[in-house]
Image: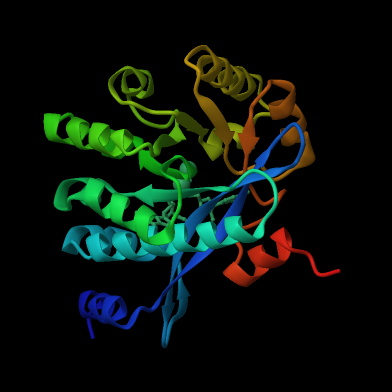
Amino acid sequence: IDMESDLRRAVVRHEFELRYQPIVRLSSGEITGVEALIRWLHPERGIVPPVEFIPLAEETGLIVPIGEWVLREATRQVAEWNTRRAGRPLTVSVNISAVQLEHTVLPDVVRSALDAAGLPADRLTLELTESLLVDHRPETLQRLHDIKALGVRLAIDDFGTGYSSLAYLRQFPVDIIKIDKSFVDDVVDEPTAAALTHGIIQLGRALQLSTIAEGIEHAGQLTSLAGGNCELGQGYYFAEPLTESAFDDLLFPAH
Ligand code: G
Ligand code: G
Ligand code: MN
Ligand code: NA
């Protein structure tokens, strides 16, 4: 069977699962949030990563029901963790495709997911890629403002890799910059990458945005980023994207 009908069946049969990667305060190691990342649990192929089906889901419009499921499931799960946890409630970050912004009444979907989960709007972050922001139509900007009006936070994902990163910061109502892994990869060994990374962090500070460094894999990277006052980070050094049950064990270690 072709992959499109395979993916349609997956939507009907709920063959998806979320993985949760912790987002950590670099100065203290405290977990402040999680990024939800989708996986397709294919009956024959096993676990299919998003890079292998998100593009098809976008072309076919199937990303709309899939994305709605991701929003509902991620907010439900994190609201549940927050009710069991002492301390400041976790935030949850969900990746949003351009197609979701075009083809759905996304603000209503977001509002409905938050209400159903009982999660305060300021605990949800939507991650937008720079390719999504290339779209300059007024409807896109209006929809982002409608979502912001709910109290949700917006992040620019993979920051620094697009063509006009700085222009997006003027145009779009963003709260968070996610520094792309390609900068973090070389922050220790390459003076240019280090200068750009620390420059992005200072830019974020000047604009009163949070900065999250992505793809931290080694202690040396953490030292450089924390030394440059990068607020938050994520990466294999802390944890890979975890199953719900593994993340649960991380939050609530057995005595
Ligand atoms: O999880 P992984 O590390 O393989 O993610 C690969 C890519 O898939 C990332 O670019 C990520 O933003 C994207 N992705 C993961 N989950 C989702 C999702 O729920 N919706 C969308 N639109 N993209 C996702
Ligand atoms: O594009 P986006 O930032 O949404 O997706 C994050 C992707 O990076 C996911 O595929 C996730 O599994 C992956 N990832 C997260 N931390 C690390 C890391 O430390 N190293 C590598 N190589 N990939 C990572
Ligand atoms: Mn992301
Ligand atoms: Na990214």
- Residue placed most toward the observer, 122 or 20: 122
Q: Is residue 5 left or right of residue 110?
A: left
Residue 197 in percent (x, y) is at 58, 23
Q: Quadrant of residue 252?
A: bottom right
The residue at 41%/87% (across/down) is: 43
Residue found at the far top of this picture? 206
Q: Is residue 226 visible?
A: yes
Q: Where 27 sits versus 216, above or below? A: above
Q: Residue at x 36, y 21 (%)?
A: 169
Residue located 44% across and 56% down the image: 118
Q: Is residue 142 above or below residue 32?
A: above
The residue at the point 61 percent across, 63 percent down is: 242
Give above or below for 200 relative to 211.
above
Quarter of the image where the C terminus is located = bottom right
Tell me if residue 184 comes above or below residue 99 in the rendering. above
Expressed as whole percent of the image width and height from the top left, the position of residue 4 reads 22, 74
Q: Tell me residue 27's x, y (percent).
A: 75, 31
Q: Percent from the top left, x then y, of residue 208? A: 50, 18
Is residue 241 visible to us here? no
